[in-house]
Amino acid sequence: MKSRFHGAATLSVLAVSALALSACTSTGGGEESGGEAGGGEVSLIKPGVLTVCSDIPYRPFEYTEEGETVGFDIDLVNGIAEDMGVQTEFIRTAFEGIQSGVALDSDQCDLAASGMTINEERESVMDFSEPYLDDNLALLVSPDSDIQSVADVQGKRVGVQQATTGETQAQENGAEVVQYEDSALMIQGLNTGDVEAVIGNISVTGPAITDNPELKLVEEIETGEQLGLAVKTGNTALLDQVNESLASMREDGTLEELEAKWLGTGEAAGSASVEPTEG
């Protein structure tokens, strides 16, 4: 079935600094809504533009390739914007600013899309969409590592992306945690020997193995994590629109096609999985 991300009419541009605050306007950029974000008509920071905070690079969800911002979340959000009849603008934002709710609360963006796991702490500072992907954690190690499972990371230098569930998992298992600003630097740290292992979402470590086949995925850690998009607390009008678009994408097969395109999976909609490496 043809998916929404082929021939999408929306335009994605990457902005490297936060937007100046402006009055909320309707999605079409015509009449001002003048109301609270929580009811009726969707209001956006910029007229006719869905402004999105993303932690770039975070392959395969959002990263830059040949000068263009691409990825799972990019296609996903462009599909939502297409339903809304607006364009998209992506703001490069540190993950801490996204997951803490600060970027949304300060009106830097309308929507947060950054491969973000839904959990209670984050739900207390933002409103999440329905989940769009199930995503466990994975333990990835260097070729000469003797680490065989997450139980072996105690006292070992383990790379994580800061403020992620991978960091929490490493801490809980007694690792010497080494924080990285983004996932690309985390994998680089493993390749250069700065760390013996990394713990991150399998949707991220899987593509890393494709690019670095010498690395070994030794364990998929069952966490039951689900990823969601987020809006400012109380912005129910935009949240309802996002959920409506996600439901349509799930029904028409678009989500499954996005998995196949960006994760190399898709046998069942909403599932990311990579087989552990032998040896």
Image (cartoon, rainbow, N blue to C red):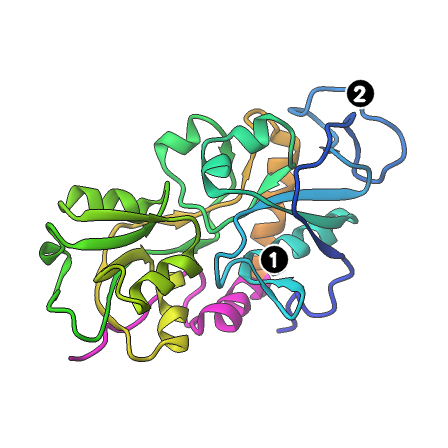
The answer to whether 48 is drawn above or below residue 269 in the figure is: above
Residue 12: x and y, percent?
A: 71, 56
Q: Residues within 10 Å of mark 1 (few under 14, many from 20)?
A: many
Q: Magenta residues, as a range?
A: 252-279
Residues at discs 1 and 2 in contact (Cβ within 8 Å): no
Q: Residues within 10 Å of mark 2 (few under 14, many from 20)?
A: few
Residue 235: x and y, percent?
A: 61, 28
What's the residue at 64%, 24% (across, down)? 38
The answer to whether 178 is drawn above or below residue 11 in the figure is: above
Residue 231: x and y, percent?
A: 57, 35
Between 5 and 152, the one nearer to me in the picture: 152
Quarter of the image that includes the N terminus? bottom right
What's the residue at 48%, 46% (across, down)? 228
Q: Main secondary structure of the magenta part?
A: loop
Q: Secondary structure at mark 1?
A: helix
Instruction: Report the Cα–Cα distance between label 1 and label 2.
Output: 29 Å
Please name the amino acid that badge 2 sits on: Gly
**Does the stretch in magenta take in 260?**
yes
Tell whether 214 sits left or right of 149.
right
Task: Identify the residue under disc 2.
Answer: 34
Tell whether 222 sits left or right of 260.
left
Please name the amino acid that badge 1 sits on: Ile
Mark number for residue 74?
Answer: 1
Q: Secondary structure at mark 2?
A: loop
Q: Nearer the viewer, mark 1 or mark 2?
A: 1
Mark number for residue 182?
Answer: none
Tell me the quarter of the picture where residue 139 sits: bottom left
Residue 132: x and y, percent?
A: 48, 52
Residue extending farthest to the top is 35
